[in-house]
Structures are given as C-alpha cells and as structure tokens.
Image (tube, grey):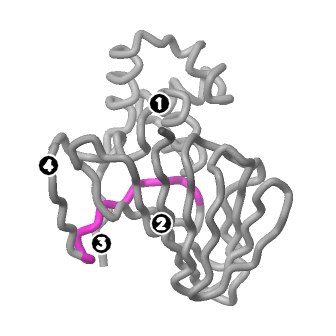
C-alpha cells in the first residue's frame, strides 16, 4: 500500500502564482474559486479537494502533478506499486495516486483513483484542457460527460475531450478503482 506523503501544496501554489505574476483575485476568477479558499490553501490551513486542485492547475496552466512532485526531470520514470505518491485531499472516501511524473516535456499525467462506496467527484462538473481516458479497474462508476451518463464496470473505458463538463460517482457496492490518463492539449 502506498504511503501518504505530506505535500506542501500551499508553498507550491504561492510559488507558481509568483512566478506567473498572478494575484489571488485573478486566480480566483480563472479557477472559479473564492479568494478566501485560495488563501486558506496557500497558507496550508485547508487541503483542496481533487476537483479544486484540478481547477487551480487548469487556471495556472500546470499539471496537477506540479503540486506534489519532487523536482526531478528524467527521460524514464519507474514507480513501484507500493511507492506511488498520494495527493492529500479532503474529499471523503477518495484517494488519488500518481502513476509517475517528472519526464522531460511530459505530455500526460496518469493517476489511480480509489473511491469508497457513494464517493463522488463533487456536485459541480469540471473540465480541463486535453483529452482524457478513464479505465475501470474494479467496481462500478457512473461518469457523466456533457450531461450523458455512462456506467463503467471492470474493464470498461471512456475516452473524451477534457473540455467537456464531467463528473463521476462510485455506484458499486464497495471500493471502486479507476485509472485516469490526461493528455496535454497540443
């Protein structure tokens, strides 16, 4: 089982905002989040939900991995199953694990999401740049993409444009697990 590592999302958020010269107010407009929420995250007083982190990364034009990766740039990345990095999230019943990052000019990000019974991505849909592939590894999920619902069971996949409004929910009888791969928009 992967260990949860303490991630200083706040410092990374503040650093990337400074680097890009974006104020909290501007980031709030771009991400759809309040200035107060962003300030609390930046000061590490609260942990963002997965959706919130995706909204922030989209607004800043960085991959979500930026917030929890160590600084390393390589041409090959090997990650043992029991050493995957987990993103700390306040979403109840959701664990997000990175399958690898740090490649030179990396064009995709891949995660395994484990969701307990009835866990969901949130009440608001989300969107992002690039394409997205979802593959159900265990259990059963309902994905809603552009207001159309898809039921994914073990072995099923769904490929769609990330710019479409999307959300998901674990509708299985217990924990469900899916692989999500997001490609960078070219």
Label whose residue precedes the other's in the sequence (4 or 2): 4
Q: Mark 1 sits on what residue?
A: 61
Q: Mark 2 sits on what residue?
A: 95
Give the crowd class for mark 3: few <14, some 14-19, many >=20 residues within 10 Å: few
The x, y position of residue 28, in whole percent, is 62, 22
Q: Mark 4 sits on what residue?
A: 74
Per the model, the C-alpha gap separating discs 1 and 2 is 23 Å
Magenta includes 29?
Answer: no
Label whose residue precedes the other's in the sequence (1 or 3): 3
**166 versus 59 height, above or below:** below
Range of magenta residues: 81-91
Q: Secondary structure at mark 1?
A: loop
**166 versus 42 height, above or below:** below
Label whose residue precedes the other's in the sequence (1 or 2): 1
Quarter of the N terminus within the rendering: bottom left
Label whose residue precedes the other's in the sequence (4 or 1): 1
The x, y position of residue 54, in whole percent, is 54, 43
Q: Mark 1 or 2, which is nearer the eye?
A: 1
Q: Mark 3 sits on what residue?
A: 2
Labels 4 and 2 touching (C-beta < 8 A): no
Residue at the image point whose x is 42% and y is 28% from the top: 43
**136 versus 185 height, above or below:** below
């Amino acid at each position: 089982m992967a260990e949860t590592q303490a991630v200083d999302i706040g410092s990374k958020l503040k650093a990337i905002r400074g680097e890009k010269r974006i104020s909290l107010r501007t980031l709030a407009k771009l991400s759809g989040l309040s200035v107060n929420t962003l300030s609390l995250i930046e000061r590490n007083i609260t942990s963002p939900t997965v959706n919130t982190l995706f909204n922030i990364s989209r607004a800043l034009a960085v991959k979500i991995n930026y917030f929890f990766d160590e600084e390393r740039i390589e041409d090959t990345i090997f990650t043992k199953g029991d050493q995957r990095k987990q993103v700390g999230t306040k979403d109840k019943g959701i664990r997000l694990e990175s399958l690898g990052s740090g490649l030179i000019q990396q064009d995709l990000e891949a995660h395994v999401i484990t969701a307990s019974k009835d866990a969901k991505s949130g009440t608001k849909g989300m969107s992002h740049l690039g394409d997205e592939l979802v593959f159900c590894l265990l259990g059963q999920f309902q994905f809603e993409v552009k207001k159309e619902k898809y039921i994914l069971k073990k072995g099923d996949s769904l490929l769609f444009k990330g710019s479409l409004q999307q959300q998901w929910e674990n509708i299985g009888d217990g924990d469900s697990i899916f692989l999500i791969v997001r490609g960078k928009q070219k």
